[in-house]
Amino acid sequence: MVRHTSGLAAGLPADDDVLLDVPDERLAPALVAAGRGEYEAAAKLLAATREAGEWENRDRYVTRLAAFARSRGEWFDDWRFAAPHDPDALLVKAELEVARGWESPARAELLRAVTPLITAAAEGDPGDPVPWRVALDHARGTNASHTVFERLWAEAIRRSPHHYGCHVSALQYLSAAWYGSHRECFDFAERAAQDTLPGSLVQALPVRAAFAYLTSEEGPGPAAKVPRERLDEAADLAIALSREYAADDPWPAEVRNLLTYVLVRLERWSDALEQLRLTGPYASSFPWDRISDDPLGQFLELRDGVRIEVAAARPLGGRGTGRGSLTSGSH
């Protein structure tokens, strides 16, 4: 096993080279400028995504900029003061306040007070689906009915039928942890993956459903049990999607991190090692922050564990299998 473990490090970056939640080459300068108290780069970046209809990038950038504004908000306060009706600033503000509301014991009450901000963001650019992703998150936190959810979902997909962020928010609402069930969650994910465009991250939706199932706190009862075959099919679809992107590509990094977690839970060690090689140095907080207060440390520890499992399964000079039985917990 020792002999194989060292060899299996090939293609994996050193621990010190692995980074958490690395911003891409467009977002990084905006965050650096914001750190200096300057909002103009962030405003220019979001305006460019809106004008070009780059909704996936826009969603990612809004989320990261709002998170930065939570810890260092002077630049954002200046932006809001200088351009109170800027649709991009309105969207960041809505995302920021929804994120703040989620952490309060009075979550539903605080989130309801945010409703006018979401409305203002949606009216800022009527064609933008990202405010509707924020609205779907908001609906989940305010205990909104299925009727309200369906209305918001219709508005979201009317603007962008294959928007990944909106699909993820809808999947969370339909999960057993919130207002749906494991069956509803998988059915929704599989339909969306089947109907989406080639190469779309929406094809990773079933593996997100698998993650929700495998991490369910309540534990699935017999009636809600998802067959192992359905979990493997979700993983296989995400593996095929991952292979459409180049190794060390930061764009699908979160999907690859999530897929790796699911593969480990399914004890598909060789497949997990392949994803770790494709992921390269790009660790993401999700899903590791769901199981550890140190997501980067958890990622690195899991990498080592996967290499050991693959090595242990290989006879000298041979190759091990990629699949095993479903484990009861994370590794």
Image: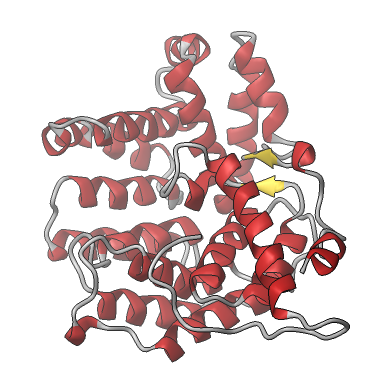
Percent across and percent down for residue 292 are: 45, 43
Would residue 25 be found to the left or right of residue 95 on screen?
right
Quarter containing the N terminus: bottom right
Vertical relation: 141 (above or below) 27: below
Which picture quadrant has residue 60?
top right
Percent across and percent down for residue 62 are: 51, 37
The residue sitting at 44% across, 79% down in the picture is 326
Q: Is residue 50 visible?
A: no
Camera-nearest residue between 175 and 294: 294
Camera-nearest residue between 177 and 264: 264
The residue sitting at 59% across, 41% down in the picture is 297
Camera-nearest residue between 179 and 191: 179
Q: Is residue 42 visible?
A: yes
Vertical relation: 280 (above or below) 76: below
Vertical relation: 20 (above or below) 243: above
The residue sitting at 49% across, 61% down in the picture is 163
How was the colour assigned to the protein in this rendering?
Answer: secondary structure
Camera-nearest residue between 19 and 160: 19
Percent across and percent down for residue 232 are: 51, 84
Which picture quadrant has residue 237?
bottom right
Would residue 220 be found to the left or right of residue 287 on screen?
left
Q: How many marks?
A: 0
